[in-house]
Image: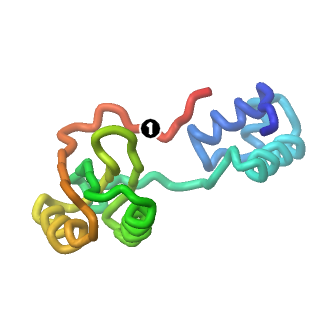
Amino acid sequence: MEELDDIDKIILKKLQENAKITTKELANILHLTVSPVYERIRRLENLKYIKEYVAILDKRLLNKSITALCQVSMRYHNEAYIEMFEREILGFEEIQECYHMAGSVDFLLKINIASLDAYHDFVRHKLSRLDNIGTLNSTFVLKEIKYTHTINF
């Protein structure tokens, strides 16, 4: 992997703060012309340091204010069952994040949903119907203390 210099790091930090920052604004911050800044951004994209640009939405305004963290433990741990579970999870729009874990829990799911009733329906009619689930343990977020997509380096 190619080493990042200080200018690359500043570009990445500024893009994390505001993905809509213009190349001209970045060039002014870096005391460079627009062309080399543009080329650096393209290089960082091509090297996959920048995976994508997204808008972060307000879940409350979209009526998805309940956040559940669901711990899933599997009955069987062979590769076929794990792969099947991962494929099926990708089809559930309710699940925002899914992590394969080490430890006493096999998967951790982050689910944003409109209500506890909607969560109950999701678990009852979708999630619990997947093969090989041993146990589900759900916890609910009372208050978001820190929420960031920024990676410090």
Q: Position of residue 27 (x, y in %)?
A: 79, 37
Q: Is residue 143 above or below residue 46?
A: above
Residue at the extreme left of the image, as rendered: 117
Residue bearing mark 1: 148
Q: Which amino acid is tagged 1?
A: Thr
Q: Position of residue 138 (x, y in %)?
A: 18, 50
The residue shown at (18%, 45%) is 139
In this picture, residue 46 sits left or right of residue 20: right
Q: Is residue 12 above or below residue 20?
A: above
Q: Position of residue 36 (x, y in %)?
A: 88, 42
**Which is nearer the eye, 26 or 63?**
63
Q: Position of residue 21 (x, y in %)?
A: 65, 45
In this picture, residue 51 sits left or right of residue 35: left
Which quadrant would residue 130 be assigned to in this image? bottom left
In this picture, residue 83 sits left or right of residue 10: left
Provide the secondary structure element on which disc 1 rests.
loop
Q: Is residue 36 above or below residue 95?
A: above
In this picture, residue 14 sits left or right of residue 117: right
Which quadrant would residue 8 be assigned to in this image? top right
